[in-house]
Amino acid sequence: MGQQEVADFLKTKEGEWLTSKEIALHLEIPIKAIRESLKRLRKSNRILYKPANREYMDCGKRHFFLYKFEE
């Protein structure tokens, strides 16, 4: 699983903010590989990301990001 596959998937979900877990479930790829690809895409400014708001958090106190492809 490479950065390009993650970027291509985010392009197909244009306008939607997704968590790394949602991306991993759709692509059927281990979450660790997805997070590493997202980290590299963030550093290269190829994707947009933001902290999830409290209403979105359903996993307790853990903080996480939402991602989408830069339009």
Image (cartoon, helix red, strand yellow):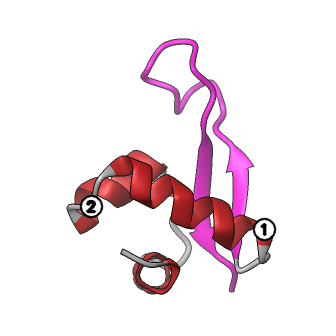
Residue 17 in view here: no
Amino acid type indicated by mark 1: Lys
Q: Residue at x 26, y 61 (%)?
A: 29
* Amino acid type for the residue under numbered disc 2: Ile
Q: Who's the residue at 32% across and 56% down the image?
A: 24
Q: Position of residue 19 (x, y in %)?
A: 48, 49
Q: Earlier in the sequence, mark 1 or mark 2?
A: 2
Query: Residue at point 72% right, 66% down?
Result: 42
- Pinpoint residue 33: horizontal percent, then vertical percent: 41, 58
Residue that mark 2 sits on:
29
Q: Does residue 48 belong to the magenta stretch?
A: yes
Per the image, label 2 sits on a secondary structure element best described as: loop
Q: Name the residue under label 1.
A: 43
The reply to whether callout 1 and callout 2 are in contact (CB within 8 Å) is no
In the current view of this chain or complex, which residue is farthest to the top?
Answer: 61
Which image quadrant is residue 25 in?
bottom left
Instruction: Give the magenta range.
Output: 47-71
